[in-house]
Amino acid sequence: MKPIQLIFEEKFISKLLLYICGLRWEIMAIFCPNCGMRLEENSNFCGNCGLQITQAIPRKKNMKLVVAGLIIMIIGIVIVVYFAVTIQNSNNNPLSNLGYSNTTYGFGLNPPAGWTTNTSGSSGAIVSFFAPNNIDNINIVPGQLPTGMSLENYIISEINSYDDSFADTLLSNNTRTVNGMNAYEYVFTYTVQDYNIELKMKQVAVEKNSNLIILTYTAIPEDYDIYYDAFESSVNSLRII
């Protein structure tokens, strides 16, 4: 299927050519020497004033139409070039149609609608997206898969390295795929000791060519299911180049 922009460009070019052809006909038309109305090709009488045409009348150029035609052609060329460049840039950057992209780390995704974006780099995250309650959030950090280690073994080793103060309870852990890329997910609870606040978290590590993008969804337990689908939608929109 052709991109919408390309279809629009082809239709525009077709209409522009038709208009230019029609304009050329108007520019090179023959006009009645008596009333100035345009004459039909090879006509013997003026359809407006009835003047009999007894000899060939030279074609008369309408300079206003000539100028208008040139302006329209220039505008048309500018528009065609603009769409051509836009399409080329879109093809060169497959992340351009996503709500958030980071060319430094080569990834992009669609954040949940209505969530705010924070790129301050807090907690080592490249970017964080905050839910409307400004508590539940998704943060994204990059990583590198160690040479010779599978994604599953790497994540399991990371989980096993957590001390008891970090992951209170590991609820689930599974392999999965995200847009054809290897991924590993795990869900756990975590208690912030200083404030005695329990959080429920899901982390999804996605790997492509040994580059990792790790997405973490953090929510208070009663909100976890409310925003879970929004998190999964963002995960499934992830692209890594």
Image: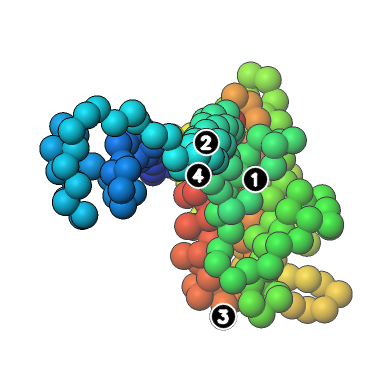
Q: Which type of secondary structure does the marked residue at label 2 adopt? A: helix
Task: Name the residue located 58 percent from the left edge and 42 percent from the top edge.
Answer: 96
Give the amino acid at mark 3: Glu
At label 2, counting other C-alpha atoms closer than 10 Å, the crowd grade (few under 14, some 14-19, many 20 or more) is few
Q: Is residue 100 above or below residue 184?
A: below
Which residue is label 2 attached to?
A: 70
Q: Secondary structure at mark 4?
A: helix
Numbered tag placed on residue 64 in the rendering: 4
The relative height of residue 221 versus residue 206 in the rendered view (above or below) is below
Mark sitting earlier along the chain (1/4): 4
List the residue tagged with mark 1: 101
In the drawing, does residue 41 fall left or right of residue 196? Answer: left
Disc with the residue nearer the chain's start (1 vs 2): 2
**Image-quadrant location for residue 179:** top left
Q: Quadrant of the N terminus?
A: top left
Residue at left 46%, top 65%?
Answer: 229
Depth check: give the residue in front, 112 or 171.
112
Q: Which mark is residue 222?
A: 3
User: How far separated are the C-alphas under marks 1 and 2?
Assistant: 41 Å
Secondary structure of the residue carrying numbered label 1: strand
Residue 131 visible at all: yes
Distance between mark 1 and mark 4 Cα atoms: 49 Å
**Label 3 Cα crowd, 10 Å radius (few <14 / some 14-19 / many 20+):** few
Are the residues at dot 1 and dot 4 in contact (C-beta closer than 8 Å)?
A: no
What whole-number distance in Å separates the C-alpha atoms at marks 4 and 2? 10 Å
Mark toward the start of the polypeptide (4 vs 2)? 4
SS for dot 3: helix
Above or below, 218 relative to 205: below
